[in-house]
Amino acid sequence: MPRQIVLVRFDLVPANDGDLPQEWSAALAAEGFSAQDFAIHRELDGLRACGYLYPAPDVRSIDDLVVDGLRRRLSQCQPQVIVARLRALMEIDGASAGRPVSHHYVVETDVAAHADADLNAWYDREHMPGLAAVPGTVRAARFRNLDGGPTYHACYSLETRETFGSQPWLQVRATDWSSRVRPHFKNTRRTMFRSLSHRFGGGRPDPG
């Protein structure tokens, strides 16, 4: 069974990337997680952050009650928190696997129904393996959002900001298959984050 992790969206307070509020530790612990299970990334152009929570290695599926509990407890600490399960579709070590991660790039999208199979084939056979092979990519992964949208969540852990937009990266994006698939994207969000996992433990491998 493909593994599941938890995506958490929230406003990182204070703005200076200080520690997580103490209340979060208790909220996470009550649902079986800890700060060491939290890989956190902050938007380059704002205070919004995303974090990935990891269950124990032998846990492949996360119960609805756990998600509801996290959502309830964390929203008491921060009203605008969003919690959703992500089911892994593909996870690949990149050309720079094992190197420190400085940035985290996320593409979230829905797709027109008639193009869904083509999008998944493109990601699996060409796009994600191609971007994973770019020097500077530490890890690449994509997931299906089980509790919200957009449907697909692709993420790339980068050794440097310059990896994104490098010539090898742009070559992967500029294929005929890419040009055929992209017009069918819907509700697309592309976000570059700065990785803060080193400040908060980040004991588990980054998802992408």
Image (spheres, rainbow, N blue to C red):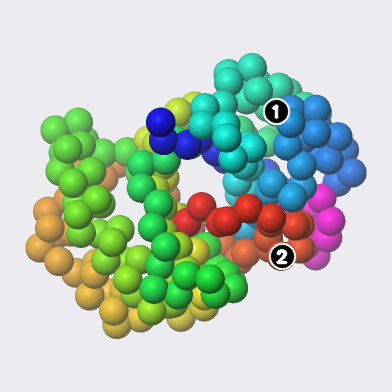
Which residue is most to the front?
A: 58
Label located before the other in sequence (2 or 1):
1
Quick check: 114 above or below 140? above
Characterize the local packing of mark 2: few (<14), some (14-19) or many (20 or more) Cα atoms within 10 angstroms: few
The residues colored magenta run 12-20
In the image, taking residue 80 as reference, residue 160 lies left or right, namely left
Q: Is residue 131 in sight in this rendering?
A: yes
Observer-side mark, 2 or 1, equals 2
The residue positioned 62% from the left and 64% from the top of the image is 195
Numbered badge on residue 89:
none
Q: Is residue 6 in sight in this rendering?
A: no
Is disc 1 placed on a helix, strand or loop? helix
The residue positioned 42% from the left and 40% from the top of the image is 88
Quick check: 20 above or below 159? above
* Disc 2 and disc 1 in contact, CB within 8 angstroms: no
The residue positioned 73% from the left and 37% from the top of the image is 33
Residue 113 lies in magenta, yes or no?
no
Report the number of discs. 2
Characterize the local packing of mark 1: few (<14), some (14-19) or many (20 or more) Cα atoms within 10 angstroms: many
- Amino acid residing under circle 1: Leu
Q: CA distance from mark 2 to mark 1?
A: 23 Å
- Dominant secondary structure (helix, strand or loop) of the stretch shown in magenta: loop
Residue 154 position, x and y percent, is: 40, 51
Q: Quadrant of residue 34?
A: top right
Q: Quadrant of residue 205?
A: bottom right
Residue indicated by mark 2 = 198
Residue indicated by mark 1 = 70
Image quarter where the N terminus lies is top left
- Amino acid residing under circle 2: His
